[in-house]
Structure formats: C-alpha cells, structure tokens
Image (cartoon, rainbow, N blue to C red):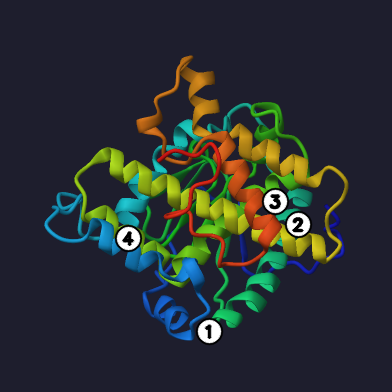
C-alpha cells in the first residue's frame, strides 16, 4: 500500500509501555443518525436494518444480560460479551514478539487518516456527519472506557462506549507469522474492519444489534446476529478499500493480502486449526468464505446500499 505520503490521523494515542491506563470518556453514537438516514431516503437496505431486526426479534423475549453489571452501557455489555470470543480468533503472543515499531504506528496512523477522509466524505451523502474513532495503541493490557480491560491476547477490538479501537501491534507480525497473512494491507484490512464497527456505532446499527440481542435468549440466534454484525464490518472495510484504490493507494497484491487475512480469521478455518473440527452453531464472525465474500462485495460496490448482511445471502452462505 502506498501510505508514506498520506496524512497521519490526529486521533491516535500511543500508550505503549503504559499498561492498564485510565479509560476514556464515553461518547458512543445513538439512534438519531440512523433516523436521519431513514428520513433522507438514501439509506437503502443498510438503513432499514434497525426496523428489520426489531420486527424479527421484537416482543416477549427476555433480556439477555439482565444479570450483568449495570455500571456500563447496554452496548458495552453485549458487544463486550461477543468480543470475548476473539481470544480464539486473534491470539497474539505478546510474550514472544517484539514491541511495535514507530514505522508500524505511522502506518496505522496513515491508514486511519485515510478512513477518516473517506467516511468524512461518504456519511454526509446519507445525511450524517462523521465523528472519527480514537485509535489506542497499547502493549500487553489497557483499561478501556467502558469495555473492561483490553488484552493483547484478544487481538484488535472496538469499544462502542468510548468510540475507540484498541490494538496491540504485536498482532501486526502475528498476521504473518501465525496466520499466514503477510503484507501491510492485511493489517490495513484489520483496522478498516474495526473502523467498520465504529461506522455501525455512528449510524445506529450497533444500537439495533443490541436491541435484537436483548430480545432473544437463544445462544444460536445471538451468534447469528454477531456473525452478521461482523460481516457487515468486513463489507465496510471493503468499501474503504474501493476508495483506497480510487485514490491510487493500492499496489499489486494488496487485495490478495486482505483476502488472505479475511480467510485466516474465518471461524471455520480457526476452529479446524484449533480443534480439528467445525461447529457452525458457535460461529460468531462468519466463515472464511463469507468474510472474503462480504469484503469483496464492499470493494466492488463502494456504497452503503449493498451492505445489508442481516437480510442478504451470498452463494455459500447459510445462517
């Protein structure tokens, strides 16, 4: 990826060597931006996700996390529960890898800046303004602003209450060494995926996901919802990749790097490697084929209208 001349985002906090730092103030998105999208008439399928989810899961079903702590927001409770499975998906071994380099920090700052430029142009087309996420680069452990204690062992994650992405950059080399997904654009895909979760938070999709989760006591249904949330983040990463190509930032092999990364973190691939078998009902992020397909769909369309993972099936997908 041609990133050296890109502007660096100012929304990056380098907390390497400061484990368990203090959390940030909560600033997660609400439902109003989604309503603006609906009223604008330009949201397409992406904009009706909230309505569809409420129709499918609404009424009569008990809340899922009633027994959980009430000191965090609803978003942080269920979404943090779902992120716990990432310990199986992104297992960074920070004890055996070296600390992140300044070049790696500069790279992600440039990629984040590119996503800010893109979403800052895209969302106003749908009647919204974009408030960028914070990128917290840390080592080992870090206290979040609403999602508990972040651990390098769990890999990159997004925390809705503080609108922040947390990355221990030892994962950067883990992509190549552990997951056979080398290349800078593999890591760019990972960051763009987490930014995709921020877009979901900004547009109200995360709120709709939370409401749907709270309306079902079925673990299988909860897993399906999380799969669809994750696949949509893959789609949004692909939408940004479409923009990156239009800007002349992609080099030969970049898309293949992203596709290999998407394949490497598919539930079926990871379960087969870890346990020698696959349990579809336990999937929380989607199969390798699904993740690749939705990333490429976003790359091909470059819009929000075709990103309704909650109601669209691609060849080979089964929910």
Res. 127 mark: 1
> Which residue bears the numbered disc 2?
106
User: Separation of disc 3 and disc 4 at Cα?
Assistant: 30 Å
Identify the image quadrant of residue 48. Answer: bottom left
Nearer the observer: mark 1 or 4; the answer is: 4
> Which residue bears the numbered disc 3?
188
Residue 70 percent location from the top left of the image? 20, 59
**Sequence-first tag of 3 and 2:** 2
Which type of secondary structure does the marked residue at label 1 adopt?
loop
Nearer the observer: mark 3 or 4; the answer is: 4
> Which residue bears the numbered disc 4?
53
User: Separation of disc 2 and disc 1 at Cα?
Assistant: 32 Å
Which type of secondary structure does the marked residue at label 2 adopt?
helix
Q: Determine crowd level at label 2: few under 14, some 14-19, many 20+ residues with C-alpha closer than 10 A.
A: some
Res. 290 mark: none
Q: Determine crowd level at label 1: few under 14, some 14-19, many 20+ residues with C-alpha closer than 10 A.
A: some
Q: Are marks 2 and 1 in contact (CB under 8 Å)?
A: no
Nearer the observer: mark 3 or 2; the answer is: 3
Q: Determine crowd level at label 4: few under 14, some 14-19, many 20+ residues with C-alpha closer than 10 A.
A: many
Q: Which residue is most to the top?
A: 276
């Amino acid at each position: 990826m041609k990133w050296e001349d890109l502007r660096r985002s100012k929304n990056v906090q380098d907390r390497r060597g400061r484990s368990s730092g203090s959390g940030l103030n909560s600033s997660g998105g609400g439902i109003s931006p989604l309503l603006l999208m609906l009223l604008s008439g330009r949201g397409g399928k992406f904009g009706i996700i909230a309505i569809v989810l409420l129709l499918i899961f609404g009424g009569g079903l008990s809340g899922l996390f009633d027994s959980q702590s009430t000191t965090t927001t609803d978003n942080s409770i269920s979404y943090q529960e779902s992120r716990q499975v990432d310990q199986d998906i992104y297992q960074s071994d920070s004890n055996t890898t070296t600390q992140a380099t300044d070049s790696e920090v500069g790279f992600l700052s440039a990629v984040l800046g590119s996503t800010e430029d893109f979403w800052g142009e895209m969302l106003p087309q749908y009647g919204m303004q974009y408030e960028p996420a914070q990128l917290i680069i840390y080592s080992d452990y870090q206290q979040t602003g609403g999602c508990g204690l972040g651990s390098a062992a769990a890999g990159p994650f997004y925390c809705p209450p503080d609108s922040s992405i947390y990355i221990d950059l030892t994962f950067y080399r883990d992509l190549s060494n552990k997951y056979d997904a080398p290349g800078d654009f593999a890591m760019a895909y990972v960051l763009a995926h987490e930014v995709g979760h921020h877009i979901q938070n900004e547009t109200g999709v995360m709120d709709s996901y939370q409401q749907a989760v709270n309306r079902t006591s079925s673990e299988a249904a909860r897993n399906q919802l999380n799969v669809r949330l994750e696949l949509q983040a893959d789609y949004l990463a692909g939408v940004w990749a479409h923009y990156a190509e239009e800007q002349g930032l992609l080099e030969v092999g970049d898309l293949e790097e992203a596709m290999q990364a998407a394949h490497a973190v598919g539930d079926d691939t990871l379960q087969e490697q870890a346990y020698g078998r696959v349990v579809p009902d336990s999937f929380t992020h989607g199969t390798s084929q699904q993740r690749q397909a939705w990333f490429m769909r976003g790359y091909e369309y470059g819009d929000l209208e075709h990103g309704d993972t909650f109601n669209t099936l691609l060849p080979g997908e089964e929910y």
